[in-house]
Amino acid sequence: GVSVWKAALMFTMSIAGAGVLGIMGTTKRSYDLLIALSLDTEGVKGSYERLGDIALGTTGRLAVFVAKFMYAFFTLIVHIKVVKDNFPSAMMGILGSSNEYLYLFEDKDVVTFVISFLVVFPLCLLRDFGLVEHTSTAKLATVFAISFIILHMYFTNPGRLPIQGTTVYEDWLAVKPNLLPSLGTFVFFFVGHHCAHLSFDSLRKDIRDIKHWKQVSTLCVLLCIFLGICMGLTVYMTFWSETTSIMLQLYPNTDEINVAKILVCGFAIFTLPLPFLAVREMIVVSIPHSEKVEDCWWLQGETQLIGRYHFALTFIIWFIATMLAILAPSLNDVLNVGGCFSGSLIAYILPSLFYFSLRGYSREACFMMVLGLVVGVMGTFFAVRTMLMHLGMLP
């Protein structure tokens, strides 16, 4: 087991990044509500799926499975997409236009596939959580380094000023177009419910309780807020209304930005094994089998397959995620659709429904339900519509 601080670092690194501050408090309470329900409900045994089964039967268990699987799978696509958007351009910038090896990085799709096969796939073959545990501190240091580079770029070269004629209201208070589909990105970045029980179980046995878990979730969210302010606010104050989620692409080609891009890729690659492990284990446990693991020759433990089947399943998941990341029209589309649909379901709607079923009505659960429905239904509609427009399937 690990300490509160170590668990908070691991949980922070299981979240994609840092999102809108307005939903931070609700998401933190959602984490605490989920773990509290799991501890107070007999038979849950640290499983989101078992909690759903006890609360709403087979429907609840299936809903949790679908939401967790889709969110974790969207996370795989996002991380590989980040590599595609940053690694080739960073290497071309570092090598320079006259380098004889520049052609190796001109085709982003090929470079992404090769990097994914040589680095991501071997990491995905791992069976346990150990690598993520040992790299969480290094990944957090990487995020701080990226934040420092962005802050340094702002103070040394603040870029464009607000467009002439704009006001403080227009820059800071006005609701921008495409708010609803963009909420998916914010929700996506603050959701870690697919790994909440794993992080809780990683605590030492003597501190594995709701009191210490609340410390973990608080530290985690505070870290996300700090990093979000360092990066998101600084970038917005540089590019204002033209700011996008692909932040580093907005800056000119400099050595600092190229280093930041490489660091982002490293962060994405070494964060990916955690959601990949969640996806693979969910597939394995969904296969019908005897209650006695020893009677199932193809199982290695409760959530792992034996050698050749483990390799085959890992390859299939990795290949599908890599190809979808290569074919995805933009990172924004993946984040918005994934966050609006699976993120709102796993973070707000399902915990609220389970609370209603097991404990009855509460204002807090009702508020989370309303928030989840607004983001989930309306946000998903507009996010999918925007993605189809980018794919040329809608005018």
Image (cartoon, grey):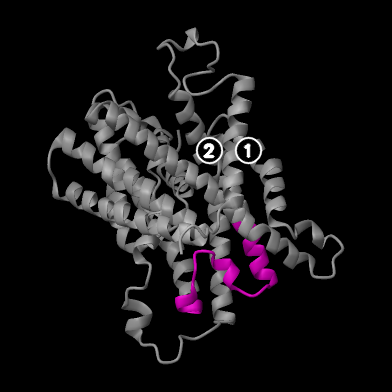
Image side of residue 244 versus residue 372, left or right:
right
Secondary structure of residue under mark 1:
helix
> Magenta residues?
237-264
Q: What residue is drawn where x is 17% and y is 34%?
A: 357
Q: Which residue is mark 1?
A: 123
- The image position of residue 320, as x and y in percent, is 58, 40
Based on the displayed image, in which of its 4 quarters is residue 196 positioned? top left
* Residue 210 visible in image: no
- Type of amino acid under label 2: Phe
- Type of amino acid under label 1: Leu
Q: Which residue is mark 2?
A: 276
Which residue is nearer to you in this view: 20 or 59?
59
Crowding near the residue tagged with mark 1, few <14, some 14–19, many ≥20 C-alpha atoms within 10 Å: some
> Does 223 sit above or below residue 6?
below
**Residue that protrudes farthest toward the left in the picture:** 361
> What main secondary structure does the magenta stretch of the protein show?
helix
**Residue that protrudes farthest toward the right in the picture:** 100
- The image position of residue 290, as x and y in percent, is 42, 11
